[in-house]
Amino acid sequence: MELDSILLPGIDPERPLVIAGPCSAETEEQTMNTARQLAADGIKIMRAGIWKPRTKPGGFEGVGSVGLAWLKKVKQETGLYVSTEVATQKHVYEALKYGIDILWIGARTTANPFAVQEIAEALQGVDIPVLVKNPVNPDLELWIGALERLGNAGLTKLGAIHRGFSSYDKKIYRNLPQWHIPIELKRRYPNLPVICDPSHIGGKRDLIQPLSQQAMDLNFEGLIIETHCDPDNAWSDASQQVTPSVLKDILSGLVIRDGKQSTEDLSVLRRQIDEIDDQLLELLAKRMRISCEIGTFKKEHNMTVVQTERYDEILGKRISQAEGMGMNPEFMRVVLEAIHEESVRQQIDILNK
């Protein structure tokens, strides 16, 4: 992909890019009130959802094209650049008609190559920055594929938004950050700007600050943060939006590291280790839950806890797999034996209840 700067005139290239605004443009008054506060605090780019994809019908799905007129008024009155999400060709045409400055493609749309291709074709010949959120599932190739479709259509002002990845299990985060995925994206495309969306990763406003700092520590180029003049009464995603004054505090408290450091420096590698360790713990916890279910089944059917043939099969197969991956077989034997010991202990506890 040939890439050009996504920065617009008047944006300081030496500072992290900040895009802020409500999850949804709800009313003209709410949109303008938020915009005025953001502009007063020095924010240059406002975001606002016009069309809102919802998992189930019946929820607030955005005000539609009428909200684009409010964003046009924001530009005229405050001088802010404005941005919104597009998911169809019609969205693209409507947004361009009202002079929207930056477009982004949402996570659900990124996961649909047909939709991305239609958007790319609608944008052919248009010199506008387009940001692509990661797909809902942790699929780096799908993310890259969406960016490549836009690049093939002649768009060069491209950027990526890291908004985390969906998980079936309940976690501290709304969407798991899995930082190693955007880091790998950046490794493959060093000139691609990657922006973090801590609002959607955290799902709670008190997680926005630490996630924003993590993104800065990982040398992300910017942040997109949901900001509302009255977040507690927001029509969508109220729990993950902050007021403009809280946003100002978050931004002023950020420590900006030396952006010239390699993403492969020691601190970044350690963060990747921490991320993987967290995933290992989650997987082990899930494995133990399944072991407990097996223990319950064995109790109900009067079976012994240890099934020797099954254990030998697992031990032999996994050690062989590990050796093929370059790991010491004795190391893997110790790991598997420890896991098996804990599984047996938990199943014995179930049998004795």
Image (cartoon, rainbow, N blue to C red):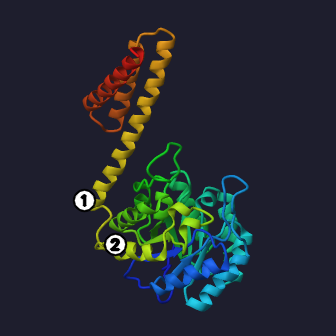
Residue found at x 58% / y 59%? 107
Give the SS element for disc 2. loop
Q: Nearer the viewer, mark 1 or mark 2?
A: 2
Q: Hey, what amino acid is under mark 2?
A: Leu
Residue at the spot of label 1: 266
Q: Earlier in the sequence, mark 1 or mark 2?
A: 2
Query: In which quarter of the view is residue 339 placed?
Result: top left
The three-letter code of the residue at mark 1 reads: Leu
The residue closer to the viewer here, 119 or 69, is: 69
Q: Quadrant of the C terminus?
A: top left
Q: Position of residue 232 (x, y in %)?
A: 54, 65
Q: Going 61% across and 73% down the picture, which residue do you hit?
A: 84
Picture residue at 35% right of the left edge, 66% below the top:
213
Q: Is residue 125 visible?
A: no
Q: Nearer the viewer, residue 33 or 76?
A: 33
Q: Does residue 57 lie above or below 329 as drawn?
A: below
* Rendering coords of residue 116 (x, y %): 65, 63
Q: CA distance from mark 1 to mark 2?
A: 21 Å
x and y percent of residue 229 in the render? 54, 75
Q: Badge 1 local density, few (<14 within 10 Å), some, or many (20+)?
A: few
* Marking on residue 34: none
Residue found at the far top of this picture = 302
In the figure, 340 relative to 286: above or below? above
Left or right, 156 with respect to 122, comes to left
Q: Are marks 1 and 2 in contact (CB under 8 Å)?
A: no
Compared to 76, does 125 lie above or below? Answer: above
User: Can you identify the residue that label 2 sits on?
Assistant: 254
